[in-house]
């Protein structure tokens, strides 16, 4: 089963991001946009996990969430990956200066590593993927449009992690909730 751990976004935040996508869509025709219901922040991509390991991963996600505290983050900017050259991903950036998001992701990395999933080699980059570009033939136009676009900042309360499955198809991924793990609920 292909799994990832997500921070789900509330309706107001998804609507704001969807509006930004709508404005960019007219100017960036070669982008495959993420559907509004699928917008999320990936806290940890787990990849293909054997069915027999899903329960252990679920417990690891619950344990890490049990040690985390609720926090607020702001979705406040737009950008592209990689930072130069052809665009592969258009994203909305996250601002969370208290460090609670990094701490939450650190706990998650710790617990899922115990469950057999290796730690991420790259530093965590808090973002919401808005769209992907398979081949950027725009000559810099996509990057320029994203750089000039504005996003109305939105506050997102975060009080849980969600273990999600992802089934890939030619129409794009389909996500399903495997388990939800509220913050601060330690198992007895």
Image (spheres, rainbow, N blue to C red):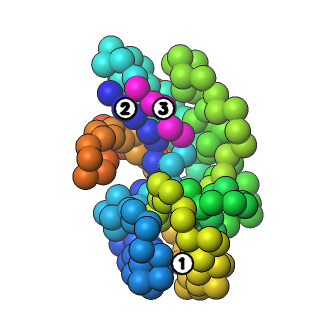
Neighbours of disc 1 within 10 Å: few (<14), some (14-19), many (20+): some
Residue 46: mark in rendering: 3
Residue contact between numbered discs 3 and 2, judged by CB atoms under 8 Å: yes
Residue 176: mark in rendering: none
Q: N-terminal of the two: label 3 or label 2? A: 2
Q: Nearer the viewer, residue 94 or 30?
A: 30
Q: Is residue 47 magenta?
A: yes
Measured in 3D between alpha carbons, the distance from the residue under mark 3 to the one under mark 2, in whole angstroms, is 7 Å
Q: Position of residue 80 (x, y in %)?
A: 62, 64
Residue depicted at x 67% and y 56%: 82
Dominant SS in magenta: strand
Split into 4 quadrants, where in the image is the N terminus? top left
Neighbours of disc 2 within 10 Å: few (<14), some (14-19), many (20+): some
Residue depicted at x 59% and y 61%: 87
Q: Position of residue 173 (x, y in %)?
A: 31, 47
Q: Which label lies toward us, 3 or 1? A: 3
Q: What are the residue bounds of the magenta stretch? A: 44-48
Q: Is residue 117 visible?
A: yes
Q: Nearer the viewer, residue 48 or 12?
A: 48
Q: Position of residue 90 (x, y in %)?
A: 55, 65
- Vertical placement of residue 12 versus 33, above or below: below
Residue ID for mark 2: 2
Q: Is residue 184 visible?
A: no
9 displayed left or right of 70: left
116 displayed left or right of 121: left
Q: Position of residue 103 (x, y in %)?
A: 68, 45
Residue 154: mark in rendering: 1
Q: Nearer the viewer, residue 40 or 148?
A: 148
């Amino acid at each position: 089963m292909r799994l990832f751990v997500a921070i789900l976004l509330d309706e107001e935040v998804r609507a704001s991001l969807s509006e930004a996508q709508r404005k960019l869509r007219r100017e960036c025709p070669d982008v495959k946009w993420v559907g509004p219901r699928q917008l999320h922040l990936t806290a940890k991509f787990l990849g293909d996990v054997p069915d027999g390991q899903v329960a252990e991963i679920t417990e690891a996600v619950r344990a890490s969430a049990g040690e985390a505290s609720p926090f607020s983050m702001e979705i406040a900017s737009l950008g592209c990956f990689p930072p130069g050259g052809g665009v592969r991903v258009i994203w909305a950036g996250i601002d969370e200066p208290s460090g609670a998001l990094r701490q939450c992701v650190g706990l998650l990395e710790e617990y899922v590593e115990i469950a057999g999933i290796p730690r991420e080699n790259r530093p965590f980059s808090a973002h919401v993927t808005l769209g992907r570009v398979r081949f950027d033939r725009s000559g810099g136009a996509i990057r320029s449009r994203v750089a000039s676009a504005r996003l109305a900042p939105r506050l997102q309360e975060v009080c849980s992690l969600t273990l999600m499955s992802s089934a890939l198809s030619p129409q794009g991924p389909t996500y399903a909730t495997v388990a939800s793990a509220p913050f601060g609920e330690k198992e007895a």
